[in-house]
Amino acid sequence: MRAVVNVFLKDGVLDPQGKASHHALDSLGFEGVADVRIGKQIIIKLETNDRDEAQKEVEQMCETLLANTVIEDYTIEID
Amino acid sequence: MNVAILRFLGTNCEFDTQYAFEKLGHKTQIIWHEEHSIGEDIDLVVIPGGFSYGDYLRSGSIARFSPIMKSVKVYAENGGKVLGICNGFQILTEAGMLDGALKRNNNLHFISKYQHLSVVNNDNAFLNKCEKGEVLNIPIAHADGNFYIDDDGFKELEENNQILLRYSDKSGNPVVVNGSVTSIAGICNKEKNIFGLMPHPERALESILGSIDGIKMLQGFEA
């Protein structure tokens, strides 16, 4: 199975990269940008074919290493 | 004092730190991250600055899983003193040994300069030779020094005198340097035996280099 993990700074934690990119988009004339958040995507190939097992395993990876839950949230998609 | 200085792949301040403590008359040893123990004769463990594991994923996030960090945790749980400087501070927050987290600087720049700091609390083993409110001049050099902690966590730091230093101007008024919550530059744990700060006291020992304010900081551990 393949897991796609997205890690983003939590709402309420200022995202300086997102903010800088937002300013850049504004100054390039892209109107109507309400917010920009920048995060990272981590793609993990797993040997298991069991979706629940994969979900559990990746959740543990996120809690242990892939995200710092003091400042970051994560989402997991398994396909 | 016997000082153990940790070295990970990508650490680059271990020899500065060694030079500093030896200049102050202490014995030092550099410990490789694959080691499994901290000697019983060690009085202080220092996690020095650098770019452990290339700052991949997040600064300090991979170093915290090195074998030696397990021993450092046990050492600290038994009351041993630990000082994390710059990347060392990042490793300690990632390891959950200090509260909060260090984010990218709010201006996205690597900031490298002398910076005034005001001493917030000195009732601890680190800053006991400094006066409360005293202004120190110490180099900073970091990209991820933007200290974040939520409101409840901040209140706890404040109530327990865990805030050590704030970025300030010459007169001691807090200034925004990297976006840190209330300009925090360094904190300690509740038990006051684990210390972390972004500035580099080991780089401020010679007046010819601009400041000797690092001496009394590092000498604090002698008491």
Image (cartoon, coloured by chain):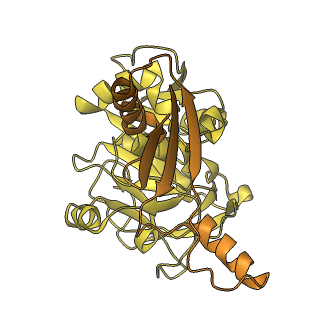
Q: Is residue B72 above or below residue B113?
A: above
Q: Is residue B38 visible?
A: yes
With B171 as the anchor, is B111 left or right in this view?
right
With B207 as the anchor, is A6 left or right in this view?
left
State the residue at coordinates (54%, 37%): B21
In the rendering, at what x and y percent does residue B151 appear? 28, 69
Q: Is residue B11 visible?
A: no
- So how many labels did they put on this image? 0
In the rendering, at what x and y percent does residue B106 appear? 58, 69
Chain for colour orange: A
In the rendering, at what x and y percent does residue B60 appear? 52, 40
Q: Quadrant of residue B58?
A: top right
Front residue of this view, candidates A4 and B178: A4
Front residue of this view, candidates A7 and B8: A7
With B24 as the anchor, is B191 left or right in this view?
left
Toward the right, the furthest residue is A28
Q: Is residue A78 above or below residue B130?
A: above
Q: Quadrant of residue B104?
A: bottom right
In the rendering, at what x and y percent does residue B149 appear? 36, 61
Q: Is residue B40 above or below residue A36?
A: above
Front residue of this view, candidates B186 and A33: A33
Chain for colour yellow: B
State the residue at coordinates (60%, 57%): B212
